[in-house]
Structures are given as C-alpha cells and as structure tokens.
C-alpha cells in the first residue's frame, strides 16, 4: 500500500503537516487562545449589551416605585425620591390581581400538561413509525407556524362558538394548546431522532412492550427536550393577550395580560399599576428560567444532530 510523501515545506516547526484537513484544522483557533486585550474588549461589549437589555427592566421597576403615576423623571436613580409601594399594595387590595393570576396559572399549567403529553407521544410516533402521510404531516405542522395568530382568530372564534365553549376556560385552553402544539411536536420529534434505536431494541428483547419501552426508556431520556417543550407551552399561555381578548369577555376569566390592559384608558394610563403588574407578571417566568437553566443549555442543542 503506497503512502503519500510529505513535503518538508508543508511541515510546521511543531511537526504538524498543513496538507489536506490539517490546513483547515490549523486555521481554526481555540477560543481559549484569545489574547488578553481581545478578552477585555469582548467583556466590554458583552457588558454593554447586558446593560442595554437590563435597562428597560430597571426603568419599569423605578416607575413602579414613583408616587403619583409619573412616567418621566429627570432623576436617574434606581430608587426614586419619595419611593412608595402603593402601586403594589393597590394591585392586591383594590384590583382583582390575585384572580387574574389564578386564571393565568390555571390556564398555563393545563396548556403545558396537554402540550407536553400530546407532543411527547406524537413526536415519538413521527420519529419511530413509518405511516402514510408522515412527511406531509410534518410539513403541514411547521407550515402552520408561518401564519400569524390574527389569521387563526376567526376560525377559532367560529369553532369555539359551535362547540359551546366560547368565553370559558376550556375555549382558551383549546386555543393556546392548538397554537403551541405544532412547534412542540417538531421539538420532540427532533430529539427522539437522536436517541439510538438500539436502546429500544434491547428493551424489547428483554420483554418490554411498546408502551413500556417508551415510558421506561425513551421518556426519561427525553427530559431536557420535555423541559423546553413545557417552558414554551407555559410561555405561550402566560403572556398572550390578543387571543384572550377575542375569546374571553367575562371579566372573571381575565388573565394577567388582559387585566393589565385595563389600566389603560382613553384619557390616562395608570403607569404605577402598569409597571408594578409588569414586574410581578415577569417574576414567575424569571424563576422558571433560573430553575430550569441547566436543562435549557442542553435541551436547546439536542435534536440538532441526528445519529
């Protein structure tokens, strides 16, 4: 067997050849080899971007503490002069904020439950089984994400009225689940594609049924993808306003976004209540992201490479 001779001119002092793939490998720098000066500039840029992202949040927090519903101020301090918690107290005493929060939590949790349950099983079916219309079904699922939610409002409105669930929890849950499900199925299907089929074959050899194989082998391995799916489903229902404004008219069913919209009138806006409510609405989402961060880092990249 003949071997290619190395040209001495293509050999570096460290003995590594620059022929073929070695040239490409040598051209790729290790991120740790960045010079100290470059690292300083990188940290400066990242810090500026972080401040740019955090500033609106700090501004909303400051407005929530200002007395008299003041929106603008020449004082740039985080804690303004005469800071007060009256806006937060008013939310819980003079406004049905807790009722809005209960509605949002109830709807969001139920939507998350159904979305995770349906997406985990449907994604597994699309990943593991060959059936007529599988590829077309996946294309149709992703095609639904191309249409804005405003195009779906009229069909949803008519369908829910005919089903007799308009202006109810059930109607809102159906609408949010239908909105979140296509992406969730794609997410789960992509992750299942990365799980070796040999694990399932071994389980079947040991006597596991199809259901046992999925529940005991595949489902536990899909935990990172399930977290991403659950978080996306929760966010779909938690912060959505437009669909709820069309499908819900009963004030006792208002969710948090609809309740906060009530602070805006034709003549004035209660900026203090608006800002205080915005801070409280964002708090559960921040807690979820912090608690699930270790799953998010791995889950966002899973499914990108197929074995």
Image (cartoon, rainbow, N blue to C red):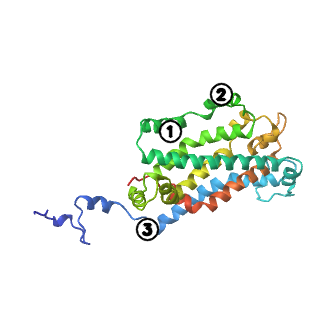
Q: Which mark is residue 142?
A: 1
Q: Which residue in the structure is indicated by mark 2?
A: 154
Mark 3 or mark 1, which is nearer the start of the sequence? 3
Q: Is residue 80 above or below residue 256?
A: below
In the picture, the disc for residue 32 is: 3
| Residue 301 seen by the camera | no
- Tell me if 258 is positioned left or right of 46 in this view: right
| Mark 1 neighbour class, 10 Å CA radius: few under 14, some 14 to 19, many 20 or more | some
N-terminal of the pair, mark 3 or mark 2, is 3
Residue 200 as seen in the image, left or right of residue 164:
left
- The residues tagged by marks 1 and 3 sit, at their Cα atoms, a distance apart of 39 Å
Q: Secondary structure at mark 3?
A: helix
Secondary structure of the residue carrying tag 2 is helix
**Residue occupying the far front of the picture:** 207
- Image quarter of residue 131: top left
Local secondary structure at mark 1: helix
| Label located before the other in sequence (1 or 2) | 1
Q: Position of residue 99 (x, y in %)?
A: 81, 47
Of circles 3 and 2, the one toward us is: 2
User: Considering the image in quadrants, where does the C terminus appear?
Assistant: bottom left
**Image point (54%, 58%), residue name:** 223
Estimate how packed mark 3 is, as few (under 14), some (14 to 19) or many (20 or more) residues with alpha carbons within 10 Å: few
């Amino acid at each position: 067997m003949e071997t290619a001779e190395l040209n001495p001119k293509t050999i570096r002092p460290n003995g590594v050849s620059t022929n073929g793939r070695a040239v490409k490998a040598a051209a790729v720098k290790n991120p740790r080899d960045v010079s100290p000066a470059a690292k300083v500039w990188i940290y400066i840029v990242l810090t500026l971007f972080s401040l740019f992202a955090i500033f609106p949040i700090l501004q909303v927090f400051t407005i929530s503490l200002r007395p008299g519903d003041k929106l603008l101020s020449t004082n740039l301090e985080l804690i303004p002069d005469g800071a007060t918690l009256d806006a937060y107290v008013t939310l819980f005493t003079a406004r049905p904020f807790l009722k809005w929060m209960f509605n949002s939590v109830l709807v969001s949790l139920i939507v998350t439950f159904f979305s995770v349950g349906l997406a985990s099983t449907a994604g597994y079916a699309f990943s593991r089984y060959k059936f007529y219309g599988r590829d077309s079904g996946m294309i149709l699922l992703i095609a639904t994400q191309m249409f804005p939610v405003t195009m779906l409002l009229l069909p949803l409105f008519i369908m829910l009225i005919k089903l007799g669930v308009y202006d109810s929890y059930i109607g809102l849950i159906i609408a949010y689940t239908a909105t979140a499900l296509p992406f969730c199925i794609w997410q789960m299907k992509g992750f299942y594609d990365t799980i070796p089929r040999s694990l399932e074959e071994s389980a079947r050899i040991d006597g596991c049924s199809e259901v046992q194989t999925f529940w005991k082998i595949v489902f536990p391995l899909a935990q990172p993808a399930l977290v991403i799916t659950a978080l996306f489903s929760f966010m779909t229902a938690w912060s959505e306003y437009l669909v709820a404004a069309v499908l819900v008219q009963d004030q006792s069913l208002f969710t948090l976004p609809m309740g906060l919209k009530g602070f805006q009138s034709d003549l004035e806006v209660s900026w203090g209540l608006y800002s205080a409510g915005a801070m409280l609405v964002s708090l559960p989402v921040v807690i979820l992201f912090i608690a699930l961060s270790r799953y998010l880092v791995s889950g966002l990249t899973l499914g990108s490479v197929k074995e």
